[in-house]
Amino acid sequence: MNKNSSDLFTTIASWTHRLSLSVLLTSCLCSPSWGQVKTAEIIGSPTVNDERVTVRIKVKGTDDKPEMGLQDTDFSLLVDNKPVKFPNKDWKSATDTTPPPAWIIFLLDFSGSMNNQDSRGTTKLAGAINAIREFTAALVDRGSKTQVAIVPFGEPGPHCEGNSVSNEELNKFFPAGDFKLSNYLDYLASQKPCASTNIYEPLSKAVRFLANSEDKRFYVPEDSLQAQPRLSVILLSDGYHNKANEEQDFNTLITLLKRNDQIIVHTLGYGLTPEELGQKYGLNRPAKRTDIGNGPHKVPEDDFVDKERLAEIAKVTGGISEFSASAQAVTDKLKLFLNALLGEYEITYIEPNAERGSKHDVQVVVQSTKDSKVTSEAKPYTIGVFGRSLPLNMRLLMLLVVFLALVGGGVIPFWLWAKHLKQEAQEI
């Protein structure tokens, strides 16, 4: 073998070793079992069909965002504190499960600053509407039974009618793939927003609307076989709540959100982050509300987005808060919200002690790191009257009891009565 061939093989061997090491490291870092899982939650009540029980699980990572890439081997079950196995075919990934029904109100900021261009030269209104189109298309692709209401909001001004939020506007729901929804988005795209921003009041109205427990669309009866629909508000804003009593309004909103924790609010800021604004306007620190104004080292009102408040609103509801400077980033963040709303794993298993009317608890255990796991809170369920029959020894005992009852209560008295009649006949 000549020197050139030897060098070639040496180089190939070296790169093969490096590539293998790189692939191994990448695999380890990307595996959900290596420190990505933070919480696991069983959503709703387990569904019982004879002795088969189905649970739906939402898993979040250390960043409180949905974990979508887990495998069946990352899950295990505890039923009444005892391990229960399930076959691979009875496990469904978060993208393969049939999405639950959902009602989504999309609050779209219609302030005048939405006419401005984003970081890539697209007007914010056009970018937001295109992102909503892709969001609804993704809902259709997932086969989701989702109803969506697009609600523009904004305070009127001297030369602007604004966009007030009423129950009538909030109730304009359309199925995700309905042409009427597409037509409405076309109409909104043709408008020129001119309002000022009032975030807290429209959001409060949307939450109160979805919180109406008398509305059977949002709250199915407890004895219903239908799944409880997911309720969510997605707030997209490129501004801040510019009212004099901002702090009081904010505290009132937070109280309302805490009282209605079944409604998840996701928030999306559309614009530059406080850090980017601070750099752009020479503040040498993240921009704050007190920096809004005109002149040197001031942030123009149209540029400021209240990242801190948007994050607080989402956090108190268990939602996600994101920030985007471009239309494409808005689209990506909305798909993240979609996964957070509908991305649920599903496991079906056989209840090992499925006696009729028996009560049980189930917990889901998810691999968190190589050496640790995350366990969900227990969820109770009851096997119905059509559950598995009683064990053989119990059935035999019951059969014996019935037999003795028949003998003692029927056969023996009849025999004694017949014997008595026979004796009377002989005496006559």
Image (cartoon, rainbow, N blue to C red):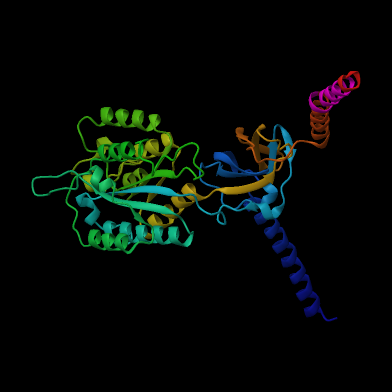
Task: Determine whether, in the image, residue 222 is placed left or right of residue 28.
Answer: left
Q: Position of residue 176 (x, y in %)?
A: 38, 58
In the displayed orientation, state which residue is furthest to the bottom.
Answer: 2
Closest to the observer, 415 or 351: 415
Is residue 123 at all visible to an observer of this figure?
A: no
**Principal secondary structure, stretch drawn in magenta:** helix
Q: Residue placed at 37% from the left, 33% from the top?
A: 257
Is residue 274 at all visible to an observer of this figure?
A: yes
Closest to the observer, 336 or 358: 358
Read off the magenta span. 409-423
Closest to the observer, 86 or 23: 86
Q: Which quadrant holds residue 132? A: bottom left
Q: Position of residue 215 (x, y in %)?
A: 35, 40
Q: Which quadrant holds residue 205? A: top left
Q: In the rendered picture of this protein, how many numbered marks are placed on residues?
A: 0
In the displayed orientation, state which residue is furthest to the front.
Answer: 428
Instruction: Pick the quarter of the image with the C terminus.
Output: top right
Q: Which quadrant holds residue 259? A: top left
Q: Position of residue 370 (x, y in %)?
A: 71, 43
64 versus 181 height, above or below: above
298 versus 81 height, above or below: below
Q: Residue placed at 28% from the left, 29% from the top?
A: 247
**Residue 34 lies in magenta, yes or no?**
no
In the displayed orientation, state which residue is furthest to the right.
Answer: 426
Q: Position of residue 134 (x, y in %)?
A: 39, 61
In the displayed orientation, state which residue is furthest to the left.
Answer: 158
Closest to the observer, 46 or 118: 46
Instruction: Pick the quarter of the image with the N terminus.
Output: bottom right
Task: Determine whether, in the image, residue 253 is placed left or right of residue 403.
Answer: left
